[in-house]
Image (tube, rainbow, N blue to C red):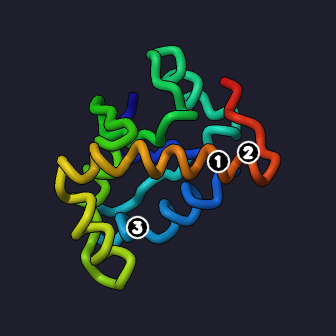
Amino acid sequence: MSDGLKIIYDGDCPFCARYVAMVRLQAAVGPVELIDARSGHPLARELTERGYDLNDGMALVAGEDIYFGEDCIHRLALLSTSSGVFNKLNAAIFRSERLSRGLYPILRTGRNLTLRALGRRPLEL
């Protein structure tokens, strides 16, 4: 894996797409590559081959480090700026590793129910 931050997320999920658009990482850490897992990007396939189920969470790749699911949103909260209402709320909740672990399964369930209600299929990698 190459250097730089990459976020791999489900582009068909309205929550995931909105989240990555609203987190102000670029202001804090510089360029961030946003990768829709449905695009067939080689990194999405590589993560799947490594055992990450992108239906269960988004991933943050930072150099050789991979943060997945609750670890991903926790790390994103630590890295992002605290400017704006969304980022302040995101930081207040997800900078806590404990809250990230507790709330993430609820967020994932909401995502899955929403995708099902919208008639969108799970990721197939």
Residue 117 spot, x, y in % from top left: 76, 51
Q: In screen coordinates, is 47 left or right of 102?
A: right
Residue 48 spot, x, y in % from top left: 53, 21
Residue 3 appears in the picture as rendered: no
Q: SS of the residue at dot 2?
A: helix
Quadrant of the rendering where the C terminus is positioned:
top right
Whether tag 1 and tag 2 are in contact, CB under 8 A, the answer is yes
Residue at image point 64% right, 52% down: 13
Name the one closer to the observer, 75 or 70.
70
Q: Residue furthest bottom?
A: 84
Whether tag 2 and tag 3 are in contact, CB under 8 A, the answer is no
Q: In screen coordinates, is 57 left or right of 42?
A: left
Q: Where, by quadrant of the figure, is residue 95 drawn?
A: bottom left
Q: Which residue is mark 1?
A: 113
Which one is earlier in the sequence, the residue at label 2 or at label 3? Answer: 3
In the rendered view, tell whether residue 95 sits above or below residue 4: below
Q: Which residue is mark 3?
A: 23
Q: CA distance from mark 1 to mark 2?
A: 5 Å
Residue at image point 46% right, 51% down: 107
- Comparing labels 1 and 3, the label whose residue is closer to the camera: 1
Q: SS of the residue at dot 1?
A: helix
Name the one closer to the observer, 88 or 20.
88
Total marks placed? 3
Q: Which residue is mark 2?
A: 116
Q: SS of the residue at dot 3?
A: loop
Quadrant of the rendering where the N terminus is positioned:
top left
Residue at image point 29% right, 82% down: 83
In the rendered view, tell whether residue 11 sits above or below residue 37: below
**Mark 2 neighbour class, 10 Å CA radius: few under 14, some 14 to 19, many 20 or more:** few
- Amino acid type at image mark 2: Arg
